[in-house]
Amino acid sequence: MGAQVGIWSYLIRYATAALPGIGTQRAAWLLTLSLGLFMVGRFVGSALLARFEGAVLMRLFAAINVGLALIACLPTGGLGVAALVMASFFMSIMYPTIFVLSIRGLGPLTKPGASMIVMAIIGGAVLTMAMGLLSDVAGTIHMAMLVPALCFVVVALYAHAQRGEGSGA
């Protein structure tokens, strides 16, 4: 959630820095496109989850997002903006898949476990603040994308650890 909220929170600022002259209104349309790709990713992801183990698909999507976030760390102009917009497609299955994988096998602790996962969404606020701090310290919004890149590494490692322990989401 932290990577999602962070990328979406900073996408307009990133786009206006990477593409001088774009303006905030046109940059906001990129955020809308990003959210549309997130929705498409949910449908495509759901279809893929019917055929592939959730942990395997999530690891692949997380690895792709590590690469996209690292591209966004570089002053690549439109390429970095496109990478962040595309990241939404690959973020689409992460939270529901993490949720399902995390509560699997909890037995009588399923309800408290599910509650803890939902409460962990606060990480979105904390990591967004970390992105702002990193951006300020580095003097560029590009370097803030290291935070989501690290988040996606953690998601990929979690998915790798879960692989083979049951069916997908």
Image: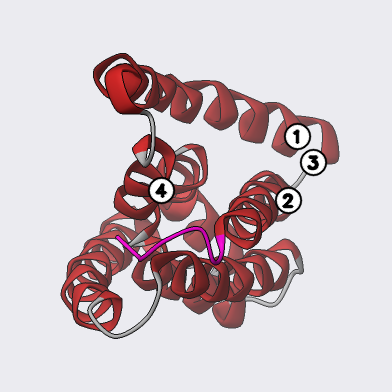
Q: Position of residue 98 (x, y in %)?
A: 41, 47
Q: Which mark is residue 162?
A: none
Q: Secondary structure at mark 2?
A: helix
- Indicate yes or no whether the magenta region holds residue 40: no
Q: Earlier in the sequence, mark 2 or mark 1?
A: 1
Amino acid tagged 4: Leu
Residue at the (37%, 81%) spot, across then down: 52
Q: Nearer the viewer, residue 151 or 17?
A: 151
| Residue marked by disc 4 | 101
| Residue marked by disc 1 | 134
| Residue marked by disc 2 | 146
Q: Earlier in the sequence, mark 2 or mark 3?
A: 3
Amino acid tagged 1: Leu
Q: Earlier in the sequence, mark 4 or mark 1?
A: 4
The C terminus sits in image quarter: bottom left
Q: Secondary structure at mark 3?
A: loop
Q: Earlier in the sequence, mark 1 or mark 3?
A: 1
- In the picture shown, does residue 32 fall above or below 116? below
Residue stretch in magenta: 163-169
Q: Quadrant of residue 149?
A: bottom right
Q: Secondary structure at mark 1?
A: helix
Q: Nearer the viewer, mark 2 or mark 3?
A: 2
The N terminus sits in image quarter: top left
Residue at the (28%, 82%) spot, across then down: 48
Q: Nearer the viewer, mark 1 or mark 3?
A: 1
